[in-house]
């Protein structure tokens, strides 16, 4: 019998260190398989919500023009700036900063991660202390006859073969301390400590410590 492929999230990002999330599924993020997390994410996020005394930490700074969805979890010292929308099963870890006019949906942002302006992320996981510059977008679905109902699953090209994400909707897995230039589309997987220049489009997997121009 063929062993199902396993892509451990812990090879790319660190589980949250927020004490408020210790007894939630987010504390086990690093030991989870990517496809398993993507398919179970809404339910796992709902479990986390049920254990928290509050969704939004009182030290978070949210601009009056920002829109925050009813299921979003926001940690200590988070900043969300003008005209930004955050919605869906999204978690903003402690110290996250999101610039103006961003749209963040169904996304995990690790501790201390900074997003520039006009960034769009959907069904994306970003590790700790990453920095994404302006106009970055991560939302990967296949073209179909009805784009409101994508039906083809997303696959990744890994060094040891093809990895099925078991979902038609997956943006990107961006590791700890990744830095990107502006106007990027980082679809796929980027290992920790990688750097990406501006005007660069990537699909597939980039190993830890690599760079591209």
Image (cartoon, rainbow, N blue to C red):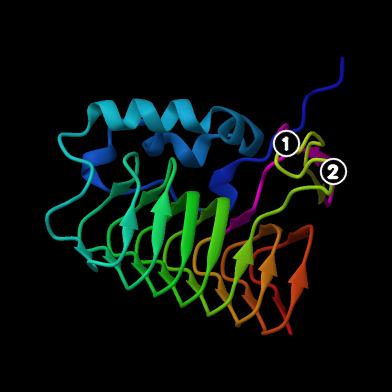
Within-10-Å neighbours for mark 2: few <14, some 14–19, many 20+: few
- Tell me if residue 113 comes above or below residue 140 in the rendering: below
| Residue 148 placement (x, y as % from top left) | 70, 41
Name the residue at 72% across, 83% down: 199
Q: SS class of the residue under badge 2?
A: loop
**Residue in the foreground of this view, choosing between 198 and 24:** 198
Q: Is residue 161 magenta?
A: yes
Q: Is residue 157 left or right of residue 187?
A: right
- Tell me if residue 45 comes above or below residue 128 in the rendering: above
Evaluate if marks 2 and 1 touch, with contact meaning CB atoms under 8 Å apart.
Answer: yes
Q: Which residue is mark 2?
A: 144
| Number of the label disc, if any, that sits on residue 40 | none
Q: Residue furthest toward the left?
A: 58
Image quadrant assignment for residue 128? bottom left
Name the residue at 49% across, 42% down: 30
Q: Is residue 56 left or right of residue 110?
A: left
Name the residue at 66% across, 46% down: 170
Name the residue at 69% across, 73% down: 210
**The C terminus sits in image quarter:** bottom right
Q: Is residue 159 left or right of residue 136?
A: right
| Residue 38 placement (x, y as % from top left) | 59, 36
Image quadrant assignment for residue 135? bottom right
N-term-proximal mark, 2 vs 1? 2
**Residue in the foreground of this view, choosing between 13 and 58:** 58
- Tell me if residue 166 comes above or below residue 62 in the rendering: above
Q: Is residue 157 left or right of residue 48?
A: right
Image quadrant assignment for residue 136? bottom right
Q: SS class of the residue under badge 1?
A: loop
Q: Which residue is mark 1?
A: 149
Q: CA distance from mark 2 to mark 1?
A: 8 Å
Within-10-Å neighbours for mark 1: few <14, some 14–19, many 20+: few
Residues in magenta, as a range:
158-174
């Amino acid at each position: 019998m063929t062993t199902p492929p396993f892509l451990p999230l812990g090879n790319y990002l660190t589980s949250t260190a927020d004490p408020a999330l210790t007894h939630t599924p987010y504390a086990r993020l690093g030991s989870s398989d990517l496809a398993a997390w993507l398919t179970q994410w809404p339910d796992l996020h709902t479990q986390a919500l049920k254990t928290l005394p509050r969704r939004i930490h009182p030290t978070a700074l949210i601009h009056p023009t920002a829109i925050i969805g009813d299921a979003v979890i926001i940690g200590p010292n988070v900043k969300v700036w003008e005209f930004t929308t955050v919605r869906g099963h999204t978690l903003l870890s402690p110290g996250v900063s999101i610039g103006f006019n961003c749209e963040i949906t169904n996304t995990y942002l690790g501790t201390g991660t900074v997003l520039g302006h006009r960034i769009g992320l959907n069904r994306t996981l970003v590790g700790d202390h990453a920095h994404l510059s302006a106009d970055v977008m991560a939302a990967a679905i296949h073209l179909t006859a009805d784009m409101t109902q994508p039906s083809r699953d997303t696959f990744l090209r890994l060094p040891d073969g093809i990895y099925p994400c078991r979902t038609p909707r997956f943006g990107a897995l961006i590791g700890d301390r990744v830095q990107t230039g502006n106007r990027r589309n980082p679809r796929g997987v980027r290992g920790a400590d990688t750097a990406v220049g501006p005007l660069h489009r990537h699909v597939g997997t980039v190993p830890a410590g690599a760079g591209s121009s």
